[in-house]
Image: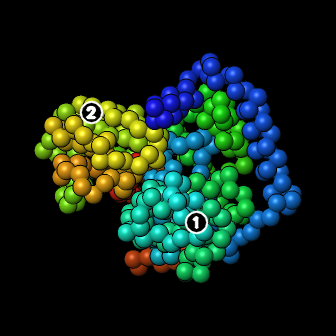
Amino acid sequence: MRDSLTLAVERAWFQTPKLLLLLLPLEWLFAALTAFRRLAFRKGWLSSGHPGVPVIVVGNLTVGGTGKTPVVLGITQSLIALGFRVAVVSRGYGGSSVGTVQVTPHSDYREVGDEALLVAQSSDALVVVGRDRLAAAKHAVRLGAEVIISDDGLQHYALQRDVEVVTSDAKAGFGNGHLLPVGPLREPPRRLATVDFFLQRGGQDPHSGTRYHAKQFRRLSDGELRSTCDPGFGPAVHAVAAIAQPQRFFETLRGLGMEPIEHCFADHRPFLGSDFDGLDDLPVVLTAKDAVKCPGSLSSDIWILDMEIEFPEGFVEQLLKRASLLGAKRASGSNAQSASSKKAAPQTLTSGGDAL
């Protein structure tokens, strides 16, 4: 029942509001509180701090489904390839941890959150979660971080930042244009005038359009890889998704010639073994963000769709400039400037999730 209600509200955010307009007074209150909070940090009425190394914030104006996590991973992998010791800090949404916790590939998603665990499993970055982003960033610096990437940190103004990257979905846009709870917006669209970079998933603008490509299928049980051209199963599959904007995932599978039977759950929802009851007649396909939440006793015929992300040409170089990092490191015999000035190569992500 809770899943159905959550999914219905999320769908309504991207349609004409109708009944949600009854919540307009709450939207006005939310807008006022959001504006006052940002002003309070800008004026110094609320305290903020900087960890002492460059801070790159990756976030969005809407709630979920904008391709943010793949962008975080793509930036992380690009900086690591240039020789930087990178730390990703996040709240650890959905996790039960209290205080500041370092995440390892073997952490429990129920403690640290699914997205943080995915980043830890998909990169060599330090990953630290904590509700206090500034404390998490300072802890990461003590562990040796040279660059901080704050995942979903746009509205966490207690952590001062050097660069702001905002992600959006070119198709979904800003939904019905309303702030929470009437629409999906956390801040008004005019906030974009103050950010450094705006990336649109599937956008056509060469300066902001970010591409995602299906790379391979990976079996959950043993990591076996299969080509997306001929995976050896299908076309009919069960497609299970507990992500924002799951239709992106389903459309990607259809683009690969598959006929997915759709099974939707609320974003970040933990999976139970019973969620897969009756799905043993066909292969099951998941995003990697969902795969980290799977019980260990599931059947072997479950597959993860891995993705590649391709940034706009010159994005990494411009990001390095804004963060005062250009030329600061050497990687594979080339300095950071020459490496980053090349056209951005696709970054392989064992993510999926909101990339789709």
- Residue occupying image coordinates x 78% and y 51%: 38
Residue plotted at (76% across, 38% down): 31
Give SS at disc 1. loop
As drawn, which residue projects farthest toward the left? 232
Classify residue 214 as left or right of residue 25: left
Residue closer to the observer: 156 or 340: 156
> Which residue is at a point 68% across and 73% down the rendered structure image?
51
Q: Residue furthest top?
A: 18
Residue at the image point whose x is 82% and y is 47% from the top: 36
Horizontal and vertical percent for residue 43? 87, 57
Circle 1: residue type: Val
Say if residue 315 shows up in the picture: no
For the C terminus, the image quarter is top left
Of the numbered discs 2 and 1, the one sitting upstream in the chain is 1
Q: Is residue 333 left or right of residue 72?
A: left
- Dot 2: what SS? strand
Q: Nearer the viewer, mark 2 or mark 1?
A: 1
Which residue has dot 2 on it? 260
123 is higher (above) or lower (below) than 309: below
Q: Quadrant of the N terminus?
A: top left
What kind of residue is marked 2? Pro
Q: CA distance from mark 2 to mark 1?
A: 39 Å
Position of 306 with respect to 316 (left or right) is left
Q: Residues within 10 Å of mark 1 (few under 14, many from 20)?
A: few
Q: Position of residue 352 (x, y in %)?
A: 38, 49
Which residue is disc 1 drawn over? 98
Q: Place residue 136 in its image quadrant.
A: bottom right
Relative to the observer, which residue lies in front, 107 or 235?
107
